[in-house]
Image (spheres, rainbow, N blue to C red):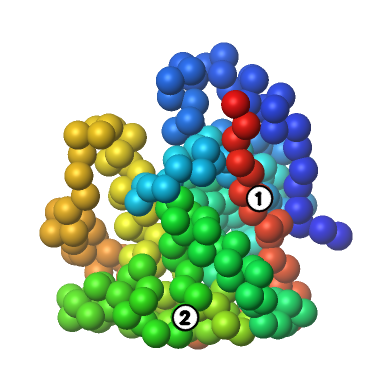
Amino acid sequence: SSTEIQGDDDRVAEYASKAIAEGRINDAVVIVLINDGRYAGTCSMYTDRKQSDVPNGMSIAYVPLIESTEPGTEFPEVLCHEAVGHGFAKLADEYCSEENGKMSDADKRHFQEWQEFGFSRNIALDSDLTKSYWANFASDSRYGFERLGCYEGAAGYVKDVYRPTFNSIMNDNIDGFSVAGRLMIYKRCMKIALGDKWKFSNADFVAFDLEEAKASASSKRRAPAKRSSAFKPLGKPRIIVKVE
C-alpha cells in the first residue's frame, strides 16, 4: 500500500555511466521506469554539500508506468513531479499530511541546511513572506496572477512550514510549477549549459519567464487544492550525501 519505491541506486548509477560521460554525471537526472501499473514514485537526490545558489548532484527518479486516469495520479504528472520537480530542480514537496502535524525544530534545521545547498527553496520556514526565496516576486505586481504568499502546509507537515501558492505540481501533482520552482529549473538549466561563466540576472529570468507563465497560468493554482480523502502522497524524496 506504500507509494515509496526503493532501488539499487549504485547499480542504476553504474548503468547510467555507460551513456553519460564522467564529467556530466553530476548533472544527470536518471529515470527508472518500472513495469508496474500502481501509483507510486520516489526520487533519490545526491549532493556534495557545497554551499551554492544552484544545487548540483545526480538524481534518480523511480516512476512506475502508472495506469490510473485520475487527475493527480497519472503517469505524466507523477513523472514530472519526481523527475523535474525533485530530480532536476531539487524541490521539496508542497503537500501536507494530517498525521504529521507541526514541523519540529529539528526538521526545520534539516531543511535550512539543505536550502544552503540550493535544495528545497520552494518552501519557507517562516510565515514572514519577506524571508522567503520568492519574496521579490511576491512584491512584483507583474506576478500578481500567481497570488504568491506563505500558505501554511508543505514538506508533508501541516503547521510551521509554508508553500508559495495554493497549489502546484509539487502539491498534488496537478498544474504547473510556481515561480519558486520555475526559478530553480531555470538556474539549473543555465548553469549546466553555460558553466561558471553564467551569472544569474533576475531581469533576464523575468524576461524569459513572465509572459509564458502568465499565459499558461490556470485557475487551479489560484484556488485552494481540493483533493479526495483517498489522496496519497508519493514517496518522500531522499537527499543523500555523495561519498567520494
- Callout 1 environment at 10 Å: few (<14), some (14 to 19), or many (20+)? some
The front one of 211 and 156 is: 156
Q: Position of residue 208 (x, y in %)?
A: 19, 54
Say which residue label 1 marks. 238
Whole-angstrom CA distance, mark 2 to mark 1, is 23 Å
Q: Position of residue 4 (x, y in %)?
A: 76, 53
Does residue 81 lie above or below 140 as drawn? above
Q: Could you say which quadrant of the image residue 62 lies in? A: top right
- Callout 2 environment at 10 Å: few (<14), some (14 to 19), or many (20+)? some
Q: Residue at x 27, y 41 (%)?
A: 190
Q: Nearer the N terminus, badge 2 or badge 1?
A: 2
Tell me whether circle 2 and circle 1 mark residues in contact (CB < 8 Å).
no
Q: Position of residue 216 (x, y in %)?
A: 31, 65
Left or right for 92, reference 3: left
Secondary structure at numbered mark 1:
strand
- Residue 35, visible in the rendered structure: no
Say which residue label 2 marks. 126
Residue with the most extreme top position: 18
Left or right for 7, reference 213: right
- Residue 150, visible in the rendered structure: yes
Secondary structure at numbered mark 2:
loop
> Three-letter amino acid code at disc 2?
Asp
Does residue 189 lie above or below 244 as drawn? below
> Three-letter amino acid code at disc 1?
Arg
- The N terminus sits in image quarter: bottom right
Res 195 label: none
Q: Residue at x 64, y 20 (%)?
A: 14
- The C terminus sits in image quarter: top right
Q: Residue at x 24, y 73 (%)?
A: 136
Q: Residue at x 63, y 75 (%)?
A: 105
